[in-house]
């Protein structure tokens, strides 16, 4: 079989997935510092996430159209450039000493990640070596999870020994992010240059344009992505605070423990790959979502170590959810329709800027423990999506034919 990307190109693609995993979580790890530095409540501090995730609503469909026109490789390069500029802008904005000055740069950075998701997710689904498109995408998303595991360690090292309200570590951290991401953009240009999927029109096996059934499934997929990302962001943005409260540990110790959540997500994504090849994917998704909902309720009602273990374990069962929802919602579409579907699906990621505000309002009015009911309800709805819309397409369908 002839693959459009060579080894260097596939490794670069995996590095792209890793990069937005690192950067996205680093932004979340700065929220406790912004909360302390600017004396904010949970709801106001979570405006960082609103500025981050609103880009998915405003830019995803345009990103899908851009990617369909310029190709996946060029879309990824543009996304990396925006990420680098946003990271550099965020570093400079910390000099202003005003919370609102940070938000535009976060928006630009997130716009780059939005474009990366629109371009990289469908590319990964057809460029892997597994016979399942779901498995290919889940494998690539595993490297995104690897980045999320590394991010708390990086943030912990950057913030170690500094006051909770210090902004200098944030500044230096995002200068480093800008250098890394811009270097990756150059690498993408070199390694993906001759294998752009958009410039290689070739038979891709059976594919369909979007009819009424596919459109209904896509709309439900957008809603499921909205709920999943909202639940994940709500939990992970306040995870340091949750662990401080439940385990009575310092912020540095809690930040180190956050890596266990992302490590669980990494294990969940890689561990789901053989399951998605062997079992119907709607069953894998429904089971993972229901267990995640149950764990949220345990963490909400229990105390101490039991609550901490439960909330950290949510990462394990959250791991396969995003890529599996994405694959179900965009299954078997022709290339142009797949790029546009990816744009629509990525609009659902705006849930990361909406649901945390609801979560934060509940936390401010009641407690962080009570607020965990919000992500529990999100996961329960994702299980319903899996059972309703996952049956139409088999998990073991082949990825597009490359021969």
Image: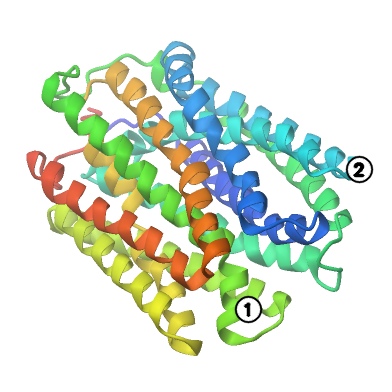
Find residue 95 and name its label.
2
Name the outermost residue toward the front.
365
The picture places residue 249, in percent across and down from the top left corner, at 66, 84
Residue 319: % across, % down: 38, 59
Sequence-wise, the earlier of marks 1 and 2 is: 2
Q: Quadrant of the C terminus?
A: top left
- Which residue is pictured at 81% across the width and 67% down the height? 164
Q: In whole angstroms, how far apart are the C-alphas of marks 1 and 2?
A: 29 Å
Which dot marks residue 244? Answer: 1
Q: Is residue 349 above or below residue 249?
A: above
Judge by depth and name the residue closer to the eye, 302 or 172.
302
Colour treatment of the image: rainbow
Q: Does 198 appear above or below 322?
A: above
Marker count (numbered): 2
Compared across the picture, whether 379 is left or right of 32 comes to left
Work out whether residue 242 or residue 77 is closer to the camera in this orientation and state it: 242
Q: Secondary structure at mark 2?
A: helix
263 on left or right of 329 = right
Secondary structure state at the residue bearing disc 1: helix
Circle 2 crowding by C-alpha within 10 Å: few under 14, some 14–19, many from 20: few
| Residues at circles 1 and 2 in contact by the CB criterion of under 8 Å | no
Residue 195: percent from left, percent from top: 45, 24
Residue at the (85%, 44%) spot, across then down: 94
**Residue 111, position as x, y percentages in the image:** 59, 30
Residue 179 visible in the displayed image? yes
- Residue 129 seen anywhere in this rendered image of the structure: no
Q: Residue furthest top?
A: 69
């Amino acid at each position: 079989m002839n693959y459009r990307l060579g080894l260097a190109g596939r490794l670069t693609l995996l590095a792209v997935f890793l990069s937005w995993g690192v950067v996205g979580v680093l932004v979340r790890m700065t929220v406790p510092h912004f909360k302390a530095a600017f004396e904010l409540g949970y709801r106001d501090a979570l405006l960082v996430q609103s500025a981050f995730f609103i880009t998915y609503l405003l830019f995803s469909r345009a990103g899908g159209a851009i990617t369909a026109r310029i190709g996946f490789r060029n879309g990824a390069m543009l996304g990396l450039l925006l990420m680098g500029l946003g990271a550099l802008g965020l570093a400079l904005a910390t000099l202003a000493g005003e919370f609102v000055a940070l938000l535009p740069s976060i928006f630009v950075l997130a716009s780059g990640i939005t474009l990366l998701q629109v371009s990289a997710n469908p590319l990964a689904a057809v460029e892997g070596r597994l016979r399942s498109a779901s498995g290919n995408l889940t494998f690539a998303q595993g490297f995104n999870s690897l980045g999320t595991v590394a991010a708390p360690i990086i943030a912990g090292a950057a913030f170690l020994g500094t006051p909770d309200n210090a902004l200098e570590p944030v500044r230096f951290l995002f200068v480093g992010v800008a250098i890394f991401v811009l270097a990756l953009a150059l690498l993408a240009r070199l390694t993906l240059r001759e294998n752009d999927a958009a410039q290689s029109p070739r038979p891709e096996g059976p594919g369909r344009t979007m009819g009424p059934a596919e459109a209904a499934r896509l709309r439900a997929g957008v809603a499921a992505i909205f709920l999943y990302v909202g639940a994940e962001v709500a939990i992970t943005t306040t995870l340091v605070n949750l662990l401080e409260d439940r385990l009575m540990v310092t912020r540095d110790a809690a930040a180190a423990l956050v890596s266990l959540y992302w490590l669980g997500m990494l294990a969940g994504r890689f561990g789901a790959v053989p399951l998605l090849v062997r079992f119907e994917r709607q069953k894998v998704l429904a089971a993972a979502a229901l267990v995640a909902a149950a764990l949220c309720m345990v963490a909400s009602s229990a105390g101490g170590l039991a609550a901490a273990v439960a909330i950290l374990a949510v990462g394990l069962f959250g791991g396969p959810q995003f890529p599996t929802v994405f694959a179900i919602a965009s299954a078997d579409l022709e290339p142009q329709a797949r790029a546009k579907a990816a744009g629509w699906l990525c609009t659902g990621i705006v849930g990361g800027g909406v649901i945390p505000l609801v979560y934060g309002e509940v936390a401010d009015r009641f407690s962080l423990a009570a607020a965990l009911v919000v992500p529990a309800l999100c996961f329960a709805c994702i299980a319903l999506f899996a059972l309703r819309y996952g049956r139409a397409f088999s998990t073991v369908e082949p990825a597009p034919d490359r021969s």
